[in-house]
């Protein structure tokens, strides 16, 4: 099969190659999925799991990419809940070869059925962004109706999901970003917008929940805005700053079939819009990943036209 392969961490995306790799077998509780579309996160080549397995052994050459939408082609021994020929989408294991390939072996529990009225490109854009937003807001942030959410990066792939899900849950959402992001953030449902370069973040007043995708000084200033009993949720590693009288939680998104189903149902009925930026073919993937243009949404690689 054809796959994007990385062998040199120092080379970054410039070291990517499109190569022939063996098709993966289905181990116990695995399925093999013929990939139609794959999502890609630009920081993946900085993640230790791209280069080492759970026993800290090197595993290059490795195949990056962790979001997928496709069709099940084989079932491993003991696999239940899915069938050959079924359309699926989901989140591949961090420490195994990923989804920038024609096929992937993946634990069945990491997948959910992809309804026939949701195309593969949309399906592949949902797992990381949708699950990160869902888990950060509801599992870790314990968001309740009537609360105020400060959503950093509100025009990004995760931020637009955070905004929409929080608004649906009855929250008031203050989005942040660059000046050029204002209209997009508001279009995705932010009640108001803070230009981090030119507006005063402190003017937003106190909030119940901060969803942090930035860290550093912005995280520190945001932590000071959290109400008593509020929560700082971050996806950029252990928090450097904590609210004076609240919680600070960092987390890594996990696959969850029930939550994937909740997210895709909202896409089907129009409550949730995905934020797809660049879409490219597998042959053009490496050029796309090495582009110097600023990202404006999720990168999706259409593995099969």
Image (spheres, rainbow, N blue to C red):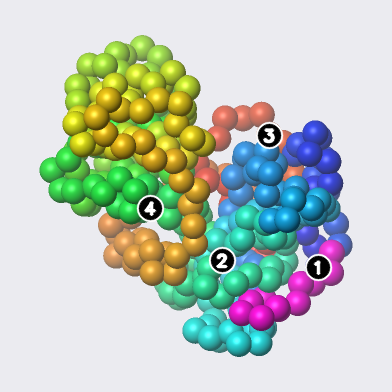
| Badge 4 or badge 1: first in the primary sequence | 1
Q: Are marks 2 and 1 in contact (CB under 8 Å)?
A: no
Number of residues whose C-alpha sits closer than 10 Å to that of mark 4, classed few (under 14), some (14–19) or many (20 or more): many
Local secondary structure at mark 1: loop
Evaluate whether residue 217 shows in this view.
yes
Mark 2 vs mark 4, CA separation in Å: 21 Å
Looking at the image, is mark 3 or mark 4 nearer the viewer? 4
Q: Indicate the quadrant where residue 189 lies.
A: top left
Q: Indicate the quadrant where residue 250 lies.
A: top left
Q: Which residue is mark 3?
A: 291
Mark 3 vs mark 1, CA separation in Å: 25 Å
| Badge 3 or badge 2: first in the primary sequence | 2
What residue do we see at 67% from left, 38% from top? 46
State which region is magenta.
Answer: 21-32
Quick one: quadrant of the N terminus?
Answer: bottom right
Q: Are marks 3 and 4 in contact (CB under 8 Å)?
A: no
Evaluate whether residue 282 shows in this view.
no
Quick one: quadrant of the C terminus?
Answer: bottom right
Q: Is residue 26 above or below residue 100?
A: below
Q: Which residue is mark 4?
A: 135
Q: Which residue is mark 2?
A: 69
What residue do we see at 49% from left, 57% from top? 254
Q: Nearer the viewer, residue 96 or 245?
A: 245
What residue do we see at 86% from left, 62% from top? 20
Looking at the image, is mark 2 or mark 4 nearer the viewer? 4
Percent x, y of residue 208? 22, 35
Local secondary structure at mark 3: loop
Q: Which residue is mark 1?
A: 1
Percent x, y of residue 136? 37, 47
């Amino acid at each position: 099969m054809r796959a994007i392969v990385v062998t040199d961490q120092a080379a970054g995306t410039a070291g990517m190659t499109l190569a022939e790799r063996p098709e993966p077998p289905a181990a116990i509780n695995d399925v093999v999925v013929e990939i139609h579309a794959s999502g890609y996160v630009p920081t993946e080549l900085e993640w230790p799991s791209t280069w080492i397995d759970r026993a800290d052994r090197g595993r290059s050459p490795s195949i990056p990419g962790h979001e997928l939408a496709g069709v099940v082609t084989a079932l491993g021994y003991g696999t239940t809940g899915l069938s050959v020929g079924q359309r699926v989408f989901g989140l591949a294991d961090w420490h195994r070869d990923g989804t920038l390939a024609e096929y992937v072996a993946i634990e069945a529990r990491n997948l959910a059925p992809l309804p026939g009225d949701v195309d593969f490109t949309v399906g592949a854009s949902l797992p990381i962004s949708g699950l990160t937003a869902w888990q950060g807001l509801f599992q870790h942030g314990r968001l309740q109706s009537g609360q105020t959410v400060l959503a950093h990066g509100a025009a990004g792939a995760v931020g637009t999901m955070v905004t929409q899900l929080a608004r649906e849950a009855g929250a008031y959402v203050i989005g942040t970003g660059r000046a050029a992001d204002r209209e997009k953030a508001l279009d995705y449902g932010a009640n108001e917008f803070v230009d981090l370069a030119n507006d005063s973040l402190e003017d937003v007043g106190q909030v119940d929940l901060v969803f942090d995708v930035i860290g550093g000084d912005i995280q520190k200033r945001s932590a000071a805005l959290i109400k008593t009993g509020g929560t700082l949720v971050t996806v950029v590693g252990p928090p450097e700053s904590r609210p004076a009288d609240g919680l600070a939680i960092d987390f890594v998104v996990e696959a969850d079939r029930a939550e994937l189903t909740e997210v895709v149902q909202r896409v089907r009925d129009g409550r949730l819009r995905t934020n797809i930026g660049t879409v490219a073919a597998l042959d053009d993937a490496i050029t796309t990943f090495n582009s110097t243009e600023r990202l404006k949404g999720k990168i999706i690689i259409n593995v099969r036209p």
